[in-house]
Amino acid sequence: MKLYYAPGACSLSPHIVAREAGIPVELEKVDHKSKRTASGADYLQINPKGYVPALVLHTGELLTEGPAIVQYLADLKPERALAPANGTAARYRLQEMLGYINSELHKAYAPLFAPETSESTRVQREIGVRKLYTLLNQHLAQQEWLVGDSFSVADAYLFTVTNWANYVKLDLSEFPAVQAFQKRVAARPMVREALVAEGLVKAAA
């Protein structure tokens, strides 16, 4: 399988999940601006949506949208317990959390990256993001992981999106449980491997 990604983008989430699941994937970097891949291909011809992630399956089919991709990968290796079994209440809780991160938190960060966003709009957007983190902080103050008692695909997604706070200079110090969560995830060996592979952190000497 091949995963199309951009360093640090939401594609980091399925990249982490693939490594946690022990699933080998070929990585191909995509340039957001030019829409060209590292091999010189026109990414829009591969994925007309134009954004990452996109996963080429063994069948040659293309699967897009991060929440769908991470669940697909988790289901390939159910023994790794990265997602509860389909049809269970726990699986719906996982999908509930993925939906919250995707439609609320992920979306809320977009204007903070845009240089054309006015300062007043940026302030309002940051207030909105903090409200979202208030709920997540309360949740993580009560349990170590987002869903159940072990690391799941939802944790990979929240870690990825929350990492963006560093790039938009959003201070999250008022959310200690979220900060502790970020440190827990970053300390996982497979997560670090993904960060190194994408050039986001340096490999250990």
Image (cartoon, rainbow, N blue to C red):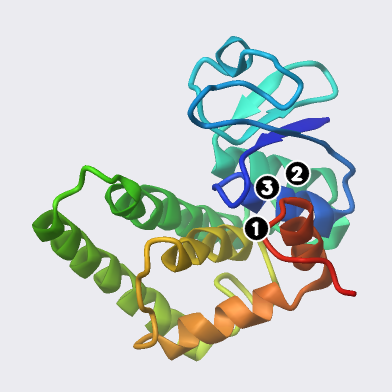
Q: Of callouts 1 and 2, which one flags the residue occurring earlier in the amino acid sequence?
A: 2
Most extreme residue toward the left is 120
Q: Determine whether, in the image, residue 37 is placed left or right of residue 202.
A: left
| Three-letter amino acid code of the residue under disc 1 | Val
Q: Determine whether, in the image, residue 153 is placed left or right of residue 204.
A: left
Residue at 82% from the left image edge and 43% from the top image edge: 76
Asked which secondary structure carries label 1, the reply is helix
Residue at 19% from the left image edge and 69% from the top image edge: 127
Asked which secondary structure carries label 3, the reply is helix
Residue at 72% from the left image edge and 54% from the top image edge: 199
| Three-letter amino acid code of the residue under disc 2 | Leu
Residue 38 on image: x %, y %: 72, 27
Q: CA distance from mark 2 to mark 3?
A: 8 Å
Q: Which residue is mark 3?
A: 14
Q: Which residue is mark 1?
A: 153
Image marks 2 and 3: residues in contact by CB distance under 8 Å: yes
Q: Pointer 2: residues within 10 angstroms few (<14), some, or many (20+)?
A: many
Q: Nearer the viewer, residue 85 or 95?
A: 95
Q: CA distance from mark 1 to mark 3?
A: 8 Å
Taking 63 as reference, is 45 above or below it? Answer: above
Q: Which residue is mark 2?
A: 73
